[in-house]
Image: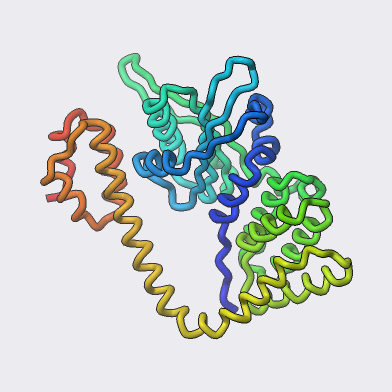
């Protein structure tokens, strides 16, 4: 049986922007209570892409940058940078610092960094980053939430009307059933039925259904069984919210024939494209850091960077670009 690939990133990314307020209320109540929700929240995707490219991105991360207004009467605006990290990354805390500093340097406004850790390493809880020498010190502390801390709270998560609780439960059960697809099917059915029983608006049910479906991916035969059981459940309950599963069934019927012939070629092409995209992104991150630090990158140096085919080497060069005292010092670190 082919193992299905769970998509944590897209599921959280979709939900985070749509349900930003309940997300903060669930995970970061202090931040939630300090925001003036009568003013609009502004999401800054283009700004975030530029900052993330300079700071370097983790392998499995979801970032969201929002500008919000405080409700303390000051009329001040604050940047909120939320990062969801779904696996352990040694440079997570350093990345949080770099993103925070780059945003502050550009806008000179308060930047609050928040972290969600969705990995399975219970002992990994980075909450700050510091470095210093000769009585000079730079340090940063930021709050994090560990999804693994909710593992023994199934009933609480299932009973909550907050969308973040349901997605946390789906996230944890996806991890817990990684090599047990039949058990994942049972949990997926249970979670989606709980979703239907929460009394949400129809559009919200459809949105959250899609997020759970992305996370709790099933092999083809079990996905078909899931669709069949959900259609039957909806008919028995006389619920009008059948469009998500109906659409899924229709799409699967239309795509099945095409996928059999195209799957192998698509997978190969996607893999090659992703590898090339990662290389290009890593090269641009090095060049961006050099421009920020030194203002100008000589053409021969830029050409040498663009010829590098090793992502790990580029990652080291990105750090060197920040640490180097001059462009000449950085050039010494480049391969011959």
Q: Nearer the viewer, residue 120 or 299?
A: 299
Q: Nearer the viewer, residue 34 or 177?
A: 34
> x and y percent of residue 30 in the render?
66, 27
> x and y percent of residue 33 in the render?
68, 27
Can residue 211 be seen in the rendering of this structure? yes
Q: Nearer the viewer, residue 29 or 38?
A: 38
Q: Quadrant of residue 104?
A: top left
Q: Residue at position x 82%, y 74% from top?
A: 232
Colour scheme of the rendered structure: rainbow
- Compared across the picture, whether 266 is left or right of 244 comes to left
Q: In the displayed structure, would residue 220 be above or below residue 18?
A: below
> x and y percent of residue 57 in the render?
41, 46
Q: In the displayed structure, would residue 289 be above or below residue 8?
A: above
Q: Residue at position x 22%, y 32% from top?
A: 324
Q: Residue at position x 50%, y 38% from top?
A: 65
> x and y percent of residue 132 in the render?
35, 22
- Compared across the picture, whether 189 is left or right of 239 comes to left
Q: Nearer the viewer, residue 59 or 120?
A: 59
Can residue 126 be seen in the rendering of this structure? no
Number of marks in the image? 0
């Amino acid at each position: 049986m082919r193992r299905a690939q769970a998509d944590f990133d897209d599921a959280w990314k979709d939900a985070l922007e749509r349900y930003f307020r309940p997300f903060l209320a669930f995970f970061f109540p202090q931040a939630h209570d300090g925001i003036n929700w009568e003013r609009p929240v502004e999401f800054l995707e283009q700004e975030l892409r530029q900052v993330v490219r300079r700071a370097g991105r983790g392998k499995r991360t979801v970032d969201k940058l929002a500008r919000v207004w405080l409700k303390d009467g000051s009329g001040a605006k604050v940047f909120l940078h939320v990062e969801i990290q779904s696996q352990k990354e040694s440079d997570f805390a350093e990345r949080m610092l770099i993103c925070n500093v780059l945003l502050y340097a550009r806008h000179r406004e308060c930047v609050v960094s928040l972290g969600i850790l969705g990995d399975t390493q219970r002992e990994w809880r980075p909450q700050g980053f510091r470095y210093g020498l000769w009585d000079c010190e730079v340090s940063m502390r930021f709050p994090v939430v560990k999804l693994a801390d909710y593992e023994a709270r199934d009933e609480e998560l299932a009973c909550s009307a907050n969308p973040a609780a349901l997605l946390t439960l789906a996230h944890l059960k996806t991890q817990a059933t990684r090599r047990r697809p039949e058990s994942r099917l049972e949990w997926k059915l249970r979670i989606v039925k709980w979703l239907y029983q929460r009394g949400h608006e129809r559009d919200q049910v459809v949105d959250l259904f899609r997020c759970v479906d992305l996370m709790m991916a099933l092999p083809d035969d079990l996905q078909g069984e899931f669709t069949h059981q959900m259609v039957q459940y909806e008919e028995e309950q006389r619920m009008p919210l059948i469009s998500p599963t109906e659409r899924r069934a229709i799409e699967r019927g239309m795509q099945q024939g095409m996928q059999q012939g195209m799957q192998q070629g698509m997978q190969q092409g996607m893999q090659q494209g992703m590898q090339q995209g990662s290389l290009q992104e890593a090269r641009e991150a090095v060049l961006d850091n050099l421009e920020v630090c030194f203002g100008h990158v000589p053409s021969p140096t830029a050409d040498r960077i663009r010829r590098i085919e090793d992502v790990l080497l580029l990652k080291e060069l990105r750090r060197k670009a920040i640490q180097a005292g001059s462009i000449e010092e950085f050039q010494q670190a480049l391969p011959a």
